[in-house]
Amino acid sequence: MKYISTRGKAPVLNFEEAMLTGLARDGGLYLPETIPTMSAGEIAALSGQSYEEVAFRVMRPFIGDTFSDDEFRDIIAKAYAGFGHAARAPLVQLDSNHFLLELFHGPTLAFKDFAMQLIGQLFQASLKRSGNRVTIAGATSGDTGSAAIEAFKGLDAVDVFILFPHGRVSEVQRRQMTTPGESNVHALAMDGHFDDCQARVKDMFNDFDFRDGVRLAGVNSINFARVLAQVVYYFTSAVSLGAPHRKVSFTVPTGNFGDIFAGFIAKKMGLPIDRLVVATNQNDILHRCLSTGEYKPDGVIPSISPSMDIQVSSNFERALYYAYDQDGAAVSQLMDELNAGGFNVSQGALQALREVFDSGHCSEEETSATIRDMYAATGELLCPHSAVGVKVANETRNSDVPMITLATAHPAKFPAAVEEASGRHPDLPARMADLYDRPERVTRIENDLAAIETLIRDRIAK
Ligand SMILES: *Cc1c(COP(=O)(O)O)cnc(C)c1O
């Protein structure tokens, strides 16, 4: 299995290299050259299997000969052993034809654990074999960072540096990043927004001296191995509702477009997905782009669903790559235009996107109202991100095709917003009840590439 860049000018890599590299050297994102498919019979045979078994069968064709079957099964088993639910991704019914896919039973209570726990084990297995060390740098709007720290803490071949926007993540998110005591974990609180943090990480990857000097590796959602891990729960949930014999649709609370892009891959693999619905909060650049074709960032407005407070949605580039018939030069040009302020999607490409994706957005008031109403109607407490999904799903769904809305975080990760909307305080699961008592360790840093690079060089030299 070969991996190629969305911009067409980076070296072709195998799965292991693409995973360890993250961002391609031409600034693009890696994708498999061809997407493996599963027959209806193979999909039907997933019914009744454990999450781990489905994960093995769905992901196996993508990893080539990087790991033997036994090694890969072992990696998957370790990745999901720390989850607090036997089904890993249980499906809960909300209404006659509406289901909630609970993706928050991992160690940091957000769906990011599905990918990050797997990638931690993949890195560990790969680096153990090669004897190499890497430096992981990531930007986070809250959930990626905690998931990465939880997945990589204490691993000997890795240092992990996470940039988060100072004062703009929830207390639970911050504490999950600042309380692990392992010395290979470095939480950096940067002045600015998530987009600034993400831009500095991209700058580090484009500074090849630095990148090669510290052996930089990326685990942001641009890493294809993360997208791949997320493909699995589209299969487990669709099969529980009758796929491949029945179509299903998904609504996905969206920021960086990684989670919903995994649904796109599942569809390309042969899973009968009818619609993939992009749900945005008031930072609705993706909804506007899918409605009008214009992609023009205009500043982030902080919301009660902070993990979706994004204007530059990295993985959207992957969807554009397919919408432009895999034309790397066209994608490259759009991204140059984006650097200069924005771009317009061509009519043909917009039509291709709309064949797969619908979209909607949700205001702050609508988010709170959805949390309140869903609690009253079902007793289910939604986190604000999941509420954005449910609101948009309710506008889009019909009685013909079951709708699955992805619940991307546990309500206790955002207790203030949830309590204000529902009147009920969401409790942390017992296994992390002492989070507020653990000591914190964090470094404040300005929004300055040179300062960040110096800090990383100094820390890994020790
Ligand atoms: C990361 C995140 C999202 C957005 O997912 P993307 O893959 O970036 O689109 C939504 N909700 C929560 C809780 C998240 O942590």
Image (cartoon, rainbow, N blue to C red):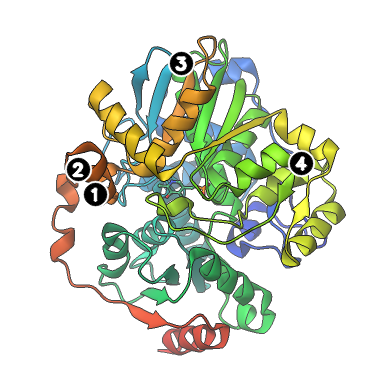
Q: Disc 1 designates what residue? A: 415
Is residue 47 at all visible to an observer of this figure?
A: no
The amino acid marked with disc number 4 is: Tyr
Q: Amino acid at mark 1?
A: Pro
The answer to whether marks 1 and 2 mark residues whose Cβ atoms lie closer than 8 Å is yes
The N terminus appears in which quarter of the rendering? top right
Residue 192 in sight in this render: yes
Viewer-side label of 2, 4: 2
- Decide which of tag 4 and tag 1 comes sooner along the chain: 4
Tell me how far mark 3 sits from mark 4, CA to CA.
28 Å
Question: Element type at marker 2?
Answer: loop
The location of residue 54, given as percent across then percent down, is 48, 30
Tag 4 residue:
322
Q: Are marks 4 and 1 in contact (CB under 8 Å)?
A: no
The 10 Å Cα crowd at callout 3, few under 14, some 14 to 19, many 20 or more, is some
Quarter of the figure with residue 201: bottom right
Residue under label 2: 426
Quadrant in the picture for residue 200: bottom right
Q: Residue sitting at 31 percent across and 41 percent down? A: 105
Q: Quick check: is the Cβ at mark 2 less than 8 Å away from ligand 1?
A: no
Whichever of labels 3 and 4 marks the residue nearer the N terminus, that label is: 3
